[in-house]
Amino acid sequence: MVKIGVLALQGAVREHVESLEAPDCEVSVVKRIEQLDELDGLVFPGGESTTMRRLIDKYHFREPLQQFAAAEKPVFGTCAGLILMAEDITGEPEGHLQLMDMEVERNAFGRQRESFETTLSVKGVGDDIEAVFIRAPLIKSVGDEVEILCEYNGEIVAARQNHLLACSYHPELTKDTRFHQYFVQMVRESKEAASTVTAAP
Ligand SMILES: NC(=O)CC[C@H](N)C(=O)O
């Protein structure tokens, strides 16, 4: 059994909970820091990153979230969640949680395309993944350890750095749960690897 939480300070939470459903996966809505201790993986939903940051600071979540990721527990950020994870944000003095080696640009898809849907090929997930972009950020550059999973019109929109997964769009707003199930599998593998290490003589 793996336990995955969805950070519920602000943003679209319920859809993530539904997309993560699997027979061996217990999903919870995270509102208190103490809940992090029980989790094997965590999702940062979409919403408004500046509001989320304000609430993260208000409820003293910043360090516990950074520790969660530093313990190599998997984290998955979508849209505003991706912005929270980035080391750098274009035009801003520094990133929020600075978990993942990438620079992101907020609201990067221009005015008339602020929201749109498309089908994408995502490495390791599928070549016909439905994606909903809502005032989405793009990933402008990534460090050496980051694997690019998906590009849209030559721009990076999904990436993975070991136990960290991020995408610009909203996989939780479609019926297609493959991206979430890819993350659930990351959490299973990470938990299994951690228990092997603990069990070693
Ligand atoms: N759908 C979203 O999560 C939008 C992200 C939002 N534009 C931000 O900058 O935080």
Image (spheres, rainbow, N blue to C red):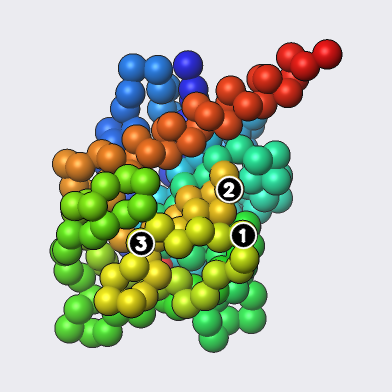
* Comes first in the chain, label 1 or label 3: 1
Residue depicted at 31% across the width and 60% down the height: 169
Taking 154 as reference, is 28 left or right? right
Side of 65 where 189 appears, left or right: left
Whether 86 is drawn above or below 62: the answer is: below
What x and y, as percent, mark residue 48? 40, 64
Proximity of marks 1 and 2: CB atoms separated by less than 8 Å: yes
Q: Which residue is mark 1?
A: 145
Camera-nearest residue between 134 and 24? 24
Image quadrant where residue 158 sits: bottom left
Report the residue at 31% width, 27% height from top. Answer: 21
Label 2 lies in ligand 1 vicinity (Cβ under 8 Å)? no
Count of number-bearing discs: 3
Quadrant position of residue 56:
bottom right
The image position of residue 184, as x and y in percent, is 42, 33
Q: Amino acid at mark 1?
A: Glu
Nearest the eye: 90 or 181:
181
The residue labelled by disc 3 is 150
Q: What crowding class fits label 3: few (fewer than 14 Cα within 10 Å), some (14-19), or many (20 or more)?
A: many
The kind of secondary structure element at disc 3 is: strand
The residue lying at 58 percent from left, 31 percent from top is 190
- Above or below: residue 74 compared with residue 79: above
- Residue 42: give x, y in percent of width and height: 51, 39
Residue nearest the observer in this picture, 56 or 95: 95
Which quadrant, please, contains the C terminus? top right
- Residue carrying label 2: 162
